[in-house]
Amino acid sequence: MNKSRTTLEQAPRDRATTPTRRLWPLLTLPALVVGVLVLVAASYFAGTAQASELGDSGALVRWALPLSKALHHSSMAITIAALVFASTILPRSTKPKRPGPGEHNTDGGAVHPAFARVMNLAAASGMVWTVSAAAVLIFNFWDLAGIPISSDPSYTSAMLDYVLNISVGRAWAWMIVIAAIVSSLALGVRSSTWVGATTLFSFVGILPLSLIGHAAGGDDHWGAVNSIMLHLAGVSLWFGGIVVLAALAPLLASKAPGRYPGTRPILAGTVLRRFSALATISIVLVAGSGIVNATIRITDLDQWFTRYGFLVMAKIAATLALGALGLIHRQRVIPALEAGKIAATRAAWKVVGAEVIIMAAVMALATVLARTAPPTPDAPPVEPTPARLLTGYELPPPLTSASWAEVWRFDWLWIAIVVFLAIAYLWAVIKVRKRGDKWPILLTISWMVGLAALFYFTSGAMAVYGKILFSVHMVDHMALTMVAPLFLVIGSPVTLALKALTSRADGTRGPREWILVLVHSKYSAVITHPLFAAANFAGSIIIFYGTDAFGFALRQHMGHELMNVHFLITGYLFALSMIGTDPVPKRAPYPFRLVILLATMSFHAFYGVSIMSSTSLIQADWFGNMGRTWGETALEDQRLGAGAMWGIGEIPTLLIALGVMVSWNRDDTKESKRKDRQADRDNDAELHAYNDMFAQMKKQDEEISRHGR
């Protein structure tokens, strides 16, 4: 004990560790200065620092609004990244151990100083996130009002109306609530599961930002919103992760056991390697979504030479510089750190320092860009059509057989998901085969077919006409629920992931560990049970079309995306509970599965007939006011959609039933072969025991009969 105390007391005087304590200010203070300078220069260049001719809210608002936005975006990114580090990259305790029988706690010793630091950072930055969101809400109100800040009581009701009825005000009010919840959880939770749940919830903060600004009124509403959503996710992980690395520098650069007795050393190379994989995904998200955003807002070559275009080019150049520094990390610094070269530590933090400075400049440019009008106007037409008022798009051409292949509207969120899942699956297959294990090619083909179907159902004609015609919407619904999930389940992605991913022995939870936690959880046991899957499938249809949830999905972009997610997951769980081979806590007997399938088919028929016989129009103010001059009437189209739900739903159900029977037969065959092998090993011991039992029973009967006489 005295030795430990002496070590802690002498640590500040240790020449080897003293410089590492200065890393945090050395890595962050220059970035703050550069960020402010770039923000000021870019504001003057773009003209946002000048007073507006239509209405000026004053110099305080003109400068406080972009500064508070920059602070908000930065603190949000740092909070999200710190939680990601805590849940996937850093160990939670100083002495991680494997759980024994009946144990749930896999940690020993004390809380690891690196884990404690990032959780404290998440809580602190979360508080800044909350306060800065409130500041943005207030300054944004006065900026939109176009008058100087005043304490006149009449403006209180105006601000209340702004928060309750104006989309921008509602978005920032929700941001305050989300940030407050995240910061509170970051301050209070410490278990691995709760930290992981908090990490997932923190990403919800991206949604309000993606729905406001230029994206909300752009000509391609879906493309703009989804591309900004992906852009914010990538920036949060990338920028925030770099700042978290800078905060961890004193721990990663020094000898952790010497400064913190009893702790296991954290290798800087290991942390940087894990973050590098995350940063690679983030770079792809940032670059890809940036290209999509640029093509939406800059539609002509000459527009690149406007003020907006020059700011975009500056942001692109800074992003490329960050990518180059990341490549240096991956190819030079990380291998040197893992090889134990001490000089590489200094090089690593020099690169991190440069990344923090450049990223601060990028965040400043992004803040100014959000306040700068793009060269392509994003305002809707003066006299929009009914379809434009309802959907945000003009009415598509009449639906013909050629339309199913020619009409597209790319949903970049689902494109990113499909591309990621395809690359991840192929990477896993290659890794498993390089190791010498086999993976059936038919499973790979099934997975790719499922992803191709998912891409078409979310970006093809079904997605476009599904906003116009109830019949096409119902076809898209059933396809997302029963076609794409069927092929995805056959691909057995969880089994492949568990084969390809390596286990971690340092107490951290990587992708493999989180998959196992989810698979073996009580939550998984409930949602993968056939009864729940079938009830969810049937109940979701009744609730969705019987309430205003359908209207929410039609009118709100987030509602539309949540609808797609729900349909896909509902179908996936249903197919997994019936024919899936991926590990689940418990599987139902085959006869029970067939009964559930028959009940599902009956439900499809009953609900389809009920809609076909209905004389009232579902969401009449939507489908009845579309202004279509082609196709069937809205009510006839609804009846056609009900028939499509009935017909399309039966075919996949029958295929699943066939799959259940095939699996049943295979299991019986395997069981017979197992018993045959067992009989060969023990010379039919089980059969002999069975016959001996009957012989003994016969002998007892004969004795009873003899004594009875």
Image (spheres, rainbow, N blue to C red):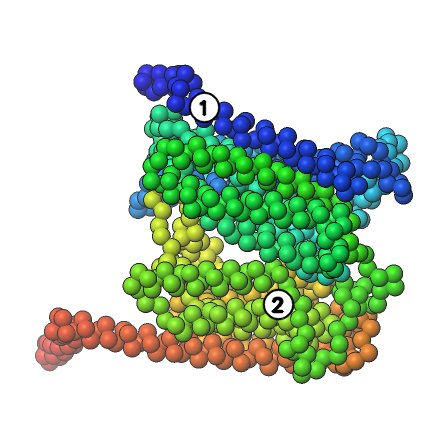
Which-is-in-front pick, marks 2 and 1?
1
- Residue at 70% x, 37% y is 39
Q: Looking at the image, which is closer to me, 481 or 32?
A: 32
Identity, as a three-letter code, of the amino acid under mark 1: Pro
Q: Position of residue 409 (x, y in %)?
A: 67, 67
> Relative to residue 484, is residue 400 drawn left or right?
right
- Is residue 208 among the parts visible in the rendering? no
Rendered view: 459 above or below 650: above
Identity, as a three-letter code, of the amino acid under mark 2: Thr
- Residue at 38% x, 16% y is 10
Q: Looking at the image, which is closer to me, 380 or 364?
A: 364
> Relative to residue 580, is residue 306 drawn left or right?
right
Rendered view: 110 above or below 603: above
Q: Secondary structure at mark 2?
A: helix
Q: Position of residue 13 (x, y in %)?
A: 41, 16
Quadrant, the N terminus: top left
Q: Secondary structure at mark 1?
A: helix
Residue under pointer 2: 458
Q: Position of residue 87 (x, y in %)?
A: 47, 43
Q: Where on the picture, by quarter, is residue 296?
A: bottom right
Q: Where on the picture, by quarter, is residue 202?
A: top right
- Residue at 78% x, 68% y is 394
Q: Position of residue 41 (x, y in %)?
A: 72, 36
> Relative to residue 96, is residue 34 drawn left or right?
right
Dot placed on the residue nearer the N-terminal end, 2 or 1:
1
Residue under pointer 1: 19
Q: Where on the picture, by quarter, is residue 64?
A: top right
How far apart are the alpha carbons under marks 2 and 1? 53 Å
- Residue at 36% x, 47% y is 504
| Label 2 crowd (10 A; few <14 / some 14-19 / many >=20) | many
